[in-house]
Amino acid sequence: MAVKNIRSRTVALPATNVDTDQIIPARFLTATSKSGFGKHLFADWRYDAAGNPKPDFVLNRPETKGAAILVAGRNIGCGSSREHAPWALQDFGFQAVVSTEFADIFRTNCLKNGLLPVVVDEQTHAWLLANPGVEISIDVEATTLTLPDGTQVKFPLEGFARYCLLNGIDELGFLLSQNAAITVYEQSHR
Amino acid sequence: MFEKVWDDHVVVPETADTPAVLFIDLHLTHEVTTPQAYTELRTRGLRLRRPDLTLATMDHSTPTRTEQVFGGVPIAVDSAARQVQQLEINAREFGVELFNLQDSRRGIVHIIGPELGITQPGKTIVCGDSHTSTHGAFGALAFGIGTTEVGHVLATQCLLQRRPKTFAINVTNALPKGVTAKDLILAIIGKIGVSGGTGYVLEYRGPVIERMSMDERMTICNMSIEAGARAGMIAPDATTFEYLAATPRAPKGAEWEAAVARWSKLPTEDGAAFDRSIDIDASTLVPMVTYGTHPGMVAPITGSVPAQGDAVFEKALKYMGLTAGEPIVNVPVNNVFVGSCTNGRLSDLRNAARVLRGHKLADGVKMLVVPGSQAVKAAAEAEGLHKVFLDAGAEWRESGCSMCLGMNGDLVPTGHYSISTSNRNFEGRQGVGARTLLASPETAAASAIRGRVTDPREFN
């Protein structure tokens, strides 16, 4: 599915180094499909031992309901390679994650699922964390994030990933189209 | 070294518009991160391109209790049982060699690759698991991938990759007696930080690394991901070749000679440039223990929890139930775990047993010893290590990821302190509310005896 423009209110989760075990704890990884992980997103931060929502956790607050952009602290998604993390974020309703730095595998996993990782400068990040709930827009084509006052902030996005997002192109299709080159490589590396 | 391995696997070079198509020599798979990838293959009517380069094991969600593995007692976690069955179905349908639950070759995916000798210098190795970096100890380029990429490799044996940068970690002088590879890698992560390696392939170099055994090198490379690195590598040498020569699936005869000649050309030339480098003086190190909720929050065992920090530090201490400035050896221990892909090899069990021999667990301490593979288990039993653990009051289990991550029934109770030889001390990693202290097998064993964090050098 193509990802072009995202316009939404933000949710701020300022903690740094939020690892994928927090995003989706390991006990939920025994599922064999990609769907339904949203209800377990941040499970140990969201629910108490009895399974009741903790009212002070940001995703349980009524004003964050429906927000599709998560502003996260530095080095979001470190640790385990589990793709269940972006699946859970997406299933919950997030379309983009904004931070100053993404863990490598998490960033790749986000892109493969059309969950947009947006790297912004410290100043923009600090402002977004200090002003949660503002409405911002993200333009994939222009690779810009627009703040409520109209300020546009460029963000880096690898060219091929951008092309795939904009056109809804799936990378496996591209890899399969390289079949002839792969066969040549295999034959020369026996 | 990284560049040589990378260049040798480029099927289609990267351009400004497209990443490189990189060929993968070995795809290790397990039950947790593959089911959705096989579903994708089925949906698209695709076949597995190279079953000969693919191996499956079960380790993450599998039980470690002997009766559930061999005794006919059902796997306690229902969804885990279904996941294990799904892997059996997928392996059969797509023609993948699978070490099932009762196979004597089964074990943690990063333990069995080296054990079999299919982890080799110069290979590209991937797995849907971040600790794939372990295999870099052999001079392979090995890294963790997500499930979508698992599907890419199943279908095409290739990945789309941008070339990472290189980062030399030069470890100089010598480790003092009683200071281990685990202490060194914890110190390195403490120094460069949990995102200090992001975007880089680390190369561990220098006399300390050159003197290390393969088991120690694997412990080092295993935790590269905890510094955020794409991979960690160590140059292959005589130690590497000696290890591989004794494995069942390494090349034999004339092929072996040719392979060693090829592998011997892999090490980085003297004077080669790295994008970044740091020096670590090993002689200054002592045993290390984590006090917080990520592996970079680490302190010398002779030291204290730092006196102050930021909001994240405060939150971590609250979770851990620790006070700023308190001595590390004051921290109580309720639970001890020896195992995992970081420290679940034979030498790790020997090191823990050496400290524990003739001692009992402190009152109230529970200890779980879980070999990294069934082969490690058999070898440990052949030399009587299991008796040392059992005599001390510990439990001796079948192989698996076990208490490293709470998804197979092996859990640390809420609020308990767990000294663990694994790789992650994240909140809830070993169970909801569990408080994990990462350390070496020696430190874990010494702490089991005293019931608080204990410097293993007291038992030398």
Image (cartoon, rainbow, N blue to C red):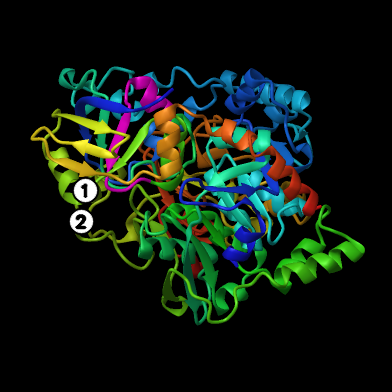
Q: Quadrant of the N terminus of chain B?
A: bottom right
Residue drawn at (62%, 71%), measured in percent from left and top? B212
Tell me which corner region of the image, top left, top right, bottom left or bottom right, holds residue B221: bottom right
Mark 2 crowd level (few <14, some 14–19, many ≥20, 10 Å Cα): few
Give, as a single range, the part of the protein colored magenta: A86-102
Residue A2, percent from left and from top? 41, 25
For mark 1, name the chain: B
Give the mark, 1 or 2, whose residue is nearer the N terminus. Answer: 2
For mark 2, name the chain: B
Residue B7's mark?
A: none
Q: Is residue B166 visible?
A: yes
Residue B305, percent from left and from top? 28, 59
Look at the image and say whether residue B265 sits in the magenta stretch. no
State the residue position of label 1: B314
Residue B151, percent from left and from top? 61, 32
Mark 1 crowd level (few <14, some 14–19, many ≥20, 10 Å Cα): some
Q: Amino acid at mark 2?
A: Gly
Q: Amino acid at mark 1?
A: Glu
Residue drawn at (63%, 18%), measured in percent from left and top? B43
On screen, residue B133 versus residue B413, left or right, reads right
Q: Quadrant of the C terminus of chain B?
A: bottom right
Instruction: Tell me if residue B324 comes above or below residue B149 in the rendering.
Output: below
Q: Contact, CB < 8 Å: mark 1 with mark 2? A: yes
State the residue position of label 2: B309
